[in-house]
Image (cartoon, helix red, strand yellow):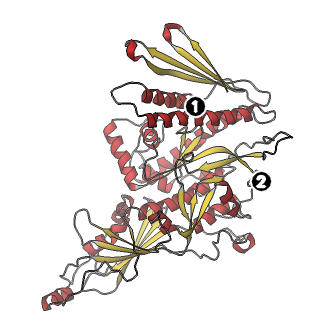
């Protein structure tokens, strides 16, 4: 891509970037009111496309999404490097500059494909722009159904992500399409607080949700903790071609599902495929480069990825390549296999093999019940770090993002407490035992004694690991019959409140058919009266691991 500079009238500057198909005009205004501190600001960015013989619908007009995206990206860089009230942070400025270069490199990649004979022409630039209105329409339909069911004008964003599908956000940090997959309760409450104090009013033409989309974009731009984002990008790699579209088979899993918008199942958009490859010269030993659409969970390599359990990686394998084997993906950076349990990988990433037992203390914010001592034994299920997943169509994208969303719910629920690895099996958190008095025995028998702590055991029911082996033979692990849907579940068990004996079992299930996307089941708790909707709301707000304490409070003494 070549660049040209034109000093226009009034001291303004126009910079033109010209590719084979894509042309970018950047208009800059020079503020000379203070000659010693002249300042550049972006007036506007205009993209256009050169006509190509391979485009069925040649359109010289560029993308308004891309125009706004590039203008914002360049303006943020200029604001960082120019003198102002805040000292210049050269590290931040350098990162901004590198980000702009990455964005231009990606556009050059698309420009090269668009210029190829028989390669699709400007479709490489406009295909996702044409797809976004359909995805936005699906999100609107799901949001309306949720808002109506809750008798609210707008759908809460966290419930929309729980019950609906990932929220499409074009041109977030890359000139492509991103998806907001999951927001932790803490992240949702943080952006909700910002939204309520911003004074922004939701545009009626936008998705009817309780967070302004412009504020949400600004919030997600900096990759906040607790937000899981996937970006659909075209990637190049050498070696054998991964899962060509010709190998796509009917899905053997029930995902994706569309309980809120049945029309979503009809959205069968297939992404453009590069029919030709960048061949190395005849006298070169360079490997052949292939093009593959991937869902990137690493923010362009700046983040680690999403920790996944083996069984859910098996679900993704079934969506992407039902009759294949994903073990080859490790060599090209699609995923990273870890020998430790996925729970250890999540809770103790620095040393996941050191222990498989973990302990945490949950304190009631209002000191309404004794501290909960949570104990967790990591399941015997290896972990993966999902980084990039090859895809061919929106159906595959929806299915993969549903699996990742389920895993994110488990991950963020566990991360709501600070866990410590139990290094010595003989060690105990319990205080030294002392001789009980008659008064203490009487209070225990009558149920009047308040314990110093409440022990709680936590576990996630495993699916059959024999049939979920991700590196097993396809014929050994696959069935012609579609696999049943497996909803993630967390089970907490604690003692009954004295004088009752026995255990209370609380099961929290991720269920997109419920009003809040969560179902709470309680077994035991004799004499306790509670509202399931209240418990589900507690889980929605991030209090899942504190449910045993709430049940303990409501338990009646006899």
Tell me: residue 396, above or below residue 426. above
- Tell me which corner region of the image, top left, top right, bottom left or bottom right, holds residue 442: bottom left
Counting residues from the start of the chain, the first of labels 1 and 2 encountered is 1
Q: Give the x, y percent position of residue 472.
A: 69, 72
**Element type where label 1 sits in the image:** helix
1 vs 2, front mark = 2
The residue under the point 38% across, 67% down is: 419
Residue 265 visible in the picture: no
Residue that carries the numbered disc 1 in the rendered image = 66
Residue that carries the numbered disc 2 in the rendered image = 240
The residue under the point 37% across, 35% down is: 200
- Tell me which corner region of the image, top left, top right, bottom left or bottom right, holds residue 550: bottom left
Q: Give the x, y percent position of residue 195.
A: 36, 41
Q: Give the x, y percent position of residue 166.
A: 53, 50
**Element type where label 2 sits in the image:** loop
User: Which residue occupies the extreme left position in the image?
Assistant: 439
Residue in front for this viewpoint, 172 or 307: 307
Tell me: residue 126, above or below residue 513. above
The reply, left or right, for residue 69 in relation to residue 545 is: right
The residue under the point 23% across, 77% down is: 452
Residue in front for this viewpoint, 542 or 69: 69
Q: Tell me the CA gap for discs 1 and 2.
A: 33 Å
Residue 473 visible in the picture: yes
Check disc 2: other Cα within 10 Å, few if <14, some if 14-19, many if 20+.
few
The reply, left or right, for residue 505 in relation to residue 308 is: left
């Amino acid at each position: 891509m070549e660049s040209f500079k034109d000093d226009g009238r009034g001291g303004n500057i126009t910079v033109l970037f010209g590719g084979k198909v894509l042309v970018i005009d950047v208009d800059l205004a020079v503020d000379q009111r203070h000659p010693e501190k002249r300042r550049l600001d972006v007036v506007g960015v205009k993209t256009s496309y050169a006509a190509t013989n391979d485009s069925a619908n040649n359109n010289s007009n560029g993308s308004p999404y891309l125009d706004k995206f590039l203008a914002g990206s360049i303006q943020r860089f200029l604001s960082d490097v120019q003198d102002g009230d805040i000292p210049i942070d050269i590290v931040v400025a350098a990162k901004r500059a590198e980000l702009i270069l990455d964005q231009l490199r990606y556009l050059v990649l698309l420009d090269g494909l668009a210029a190829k004979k028989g390669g699709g022409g400007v479709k490489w630039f406009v295909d996702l722009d044409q797809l976004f209105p359909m995805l936005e329409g699906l999100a609107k339909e799901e949001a309306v159904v949720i808002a109506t069911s809750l008798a609210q004008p707008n759908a809460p964003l966290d419930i929309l992500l729980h019950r609906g599908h990932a929220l499409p956000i074009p041109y977030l940090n890359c000139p492509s399409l991103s998806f907001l997959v999951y927001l932790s309760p803490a992240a949702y409450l943080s952006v909700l607080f910002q939204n309520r104090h911003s004074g922004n009013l939701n545009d009626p033409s936008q998705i009817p949700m309780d967070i302004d989309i412009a504020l949400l974009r600004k919030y997600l731009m900096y990759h906040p903790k607790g937000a899981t984002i996937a970006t659909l990008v075209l990637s190049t790699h050498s070696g054998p071609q991964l899962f060509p579209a010709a190998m796509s088979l009917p899905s053997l899993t029930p995902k994706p599902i569309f309980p809120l918008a049945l029309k979503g199942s009809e959205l069968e958009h297939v992404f453009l495929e590069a029919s030709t490859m960048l061949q190395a010269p005849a006298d070169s030993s360079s490997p052949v480069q292939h093009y593959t659409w991937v869902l990137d969970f690493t923010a362009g390599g700046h983040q680690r990825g999403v920790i996944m359990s083996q069984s859910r990686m098996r679900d993704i394998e079934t969506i992407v390549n039902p009759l294949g084997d994903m073990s080859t993906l490790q060599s090209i950076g699609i995923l990273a296999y870890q020998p430790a349990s996925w729970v250890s990988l999540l809770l103790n990433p620095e040393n996941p093999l050191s222990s498989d037992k973990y302990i945490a203390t949950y304190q009631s914010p209002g000191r309404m019940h004794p501290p909960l001592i949570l104990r967790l034994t990591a399941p015997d299920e290896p972990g993966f770090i999902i980084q990039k997943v090859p895809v061919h169509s929106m159906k595959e994208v929806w299915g993969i993002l549903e699996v990742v969303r389920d895993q994110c719910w488990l991950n963020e629920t566990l991360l709501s407490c600070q866990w410590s690895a139990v290094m010595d099996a003989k060690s105990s958190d319990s205080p030294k035992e002392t001789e009980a008095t008659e008064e203490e025995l009487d209070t225990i028998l009558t149920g009047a004694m308040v314990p110093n702590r409440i022990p709680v055991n936590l576990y996630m029911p495993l699916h059959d690991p024999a049939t979920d082996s991700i590196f097993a033979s396809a014929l050994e692990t696959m069935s012609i019959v579609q696999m049943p849907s497996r909803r993630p579940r967390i089970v907490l068990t604690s003692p009954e409140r004295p004088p009752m004996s026995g255990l209370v079992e609380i099961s929290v299930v991720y269920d997109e058919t419920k009003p809040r996307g969560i179902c709470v089941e309680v077994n035991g708790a004799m004499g306790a009266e509670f509202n399931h909707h209240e418990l589900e709301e507690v889980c929605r707000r991030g209090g899942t691991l504190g449910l045993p304490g709430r049940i303990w409070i409501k338990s009646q003494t006899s």
